[in-house]
Image: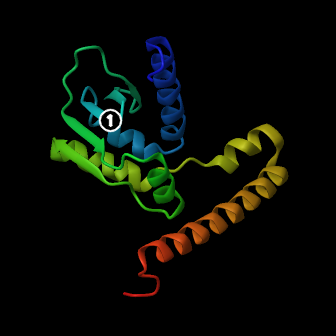
Amino acid sequence: MQPPDWAIREIQQRTVLFLNHVLQQEPEAQQRLVRQQGRVALFQWRFVTMKFVATPAGLLDLAPEGAEPELTLSVTEESPFGLARAAFTGEKPAVRIEGDVQLAAEVNWLVDHVRWDVEDDLARLIGDVPAHTIATGARRVVDALRRFVGERSGKAGGSAGAE
């Protein structure tokens, strides 16, 4: 079952707003996107598809209907649990890349170097000390989950400790 078109469009708009918020914290990322302005990339995962276009401001927008992508990024991991496991272990999900090599290299740089500073955003809302306390606790939880997922993956594959 797929959500209605209006809900999909709203989710896409919110995704663009979030990505731009993160990009605005990284001037080098914006400079790199300025060089790619007007270029369109298509992101696909299961039934989710989004076409992004780089803007003259070095941000992203949804590409207009009918825009032909110069780059297609298709996440090949079908399972949401597989994606979550990859995220918790710090791995990139498997992605099939088709299209422009230069644009693909810029997208790869963004994925490797741009991170959301959750603690900084939280500090704007509740102050530095509480934000730091919450962020430290969250990092501990994520680290514990990573260890747990890593241990479970090792047991499931029977290759724990073998390299």
Crowd class of label 1 (few under 14; some 14 to 19; many from 20; radius 10 Å): some
Q: What type is the residue that disc 1 sits on?
A: Phe
Picture mark count: 1
Q: Position of residue 6 (x, y in %)?
A: 48, 12
Residue 104 vs residue 77, the one in the foreground: 77
Q: Dot 1: what SS?
A: strand
Q: Residue at x 78, y 37 (%)?
A: 125
Q: Position of residue 36 (x, y in %)?
A: 26, 35
Horizontal and vertical percent for residue 162? Answer: 40, 87
* Between 27 and 136, the one nearer to me in the picture: 136
Frontmost residue, 27 versus 138? 138
Q: Quadrant of the N terminus?
A: top left
Name the image quarter holding residue 93: bottom left
**Left or right relative to 148: residue 35:** left
Left-right relation of 111 to 142: left
Q: Which residue is mark 1?
A: 43
**Horizontal and vertical percent position of residue 27:** 46, 43
- Against 148, residue 62 (above or below) is above
Q: Please indicate whether residue 66 sits to the left or right of residue 92 in the image.
A: left
Q: Residue placed at 41% from the left, 31% from the top?
A: 59
The colour mode here is: rainbow
Q: Residue at x 61, y 69 (%)?
A: 148
Locate the C terminus and report the quarter of the image it occupies: bottom left
- Residue 69 shown left or right of residue 75 in the figure: left
**Residue 50 position by quadrant:** top left
